[in-house]
Amino acid sequence: MKCVYCELPEIKDREIISNDLAWSFPTNIPIVPGHILVVPKRCVACYSDLTKEEKAAIEDLRMRLVAALKKVVGAQGFNFAWNDGEIAGQAVPHFHLHIVPRKEGDTGILEYDPRKFLYRPGSREKTPESELAAIVEIIKRGL
């Protein structure tokens, strides 16, 4: 099987809403009820592979789904996320935006500091301004 999002009929049957370039469906491993994925109709792996039009179509669905989730599951806030590349935890090589509605009393990921759930847990010292300035210059040279 090439891509589960493109080929599994049970995923296609879960469609919530679509437009010309993107569609959405609930994940089968939700963090909370209402956890939705938004994907482009074209099978591309990474965000950088999306066209401007596909990004706009995904954003259109994101905004519409957020409004609906506020009404139907009482969402008070949201987590939006995607993993870009296998090394970053992307298990399905088809770009997918997670929309996770949050409200008081939820379970799942409750720590929102990326340093705690992505890398280097524990306390650490702030990086000196001189090191931050150096990385700014390095990145600017790559632009």
Image (cartoon, helix red, strand yellow):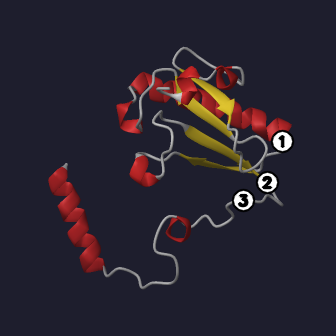
> Label 1 near label 2: C-beta < 8 Å?
yes
Q: Earlier in the sequence, mark 2 or mark 1?
A: 1
Badge 3 amino acid: Gly
Image location (x, y in percent) of residue 134 = 21, 71
User: Quick one: 19 or 76, which is closer to the camera?
Assistant: 19
Between disc 3 and disc 2, the foreground one is 3
Q: Residue at x 64, y 33 (%)?
A: 63
Q: Residue at x 46, y 74 (%)?
A: 120
User: Quick one: 80 or 29, which is closer to the camera?
Assistant: 29
CA neighbours of label 3 inside 10 A, class few (<14), some (14 to 19), many (20+)? few
Q: Which mark is residue 108?
A: 3
Badge 2 amino acid: Lys
> Label 3 near label 1: C-beta < 8 Å?
no
Label 2: state its secondary structure: loop
Figure label count: 3
Label 1: state its secondary structure: loop
User: Quick one: 89 or 54, which is closer to the camera?
Assistant: 89
Q: Which mark is residue 73?
A: 1
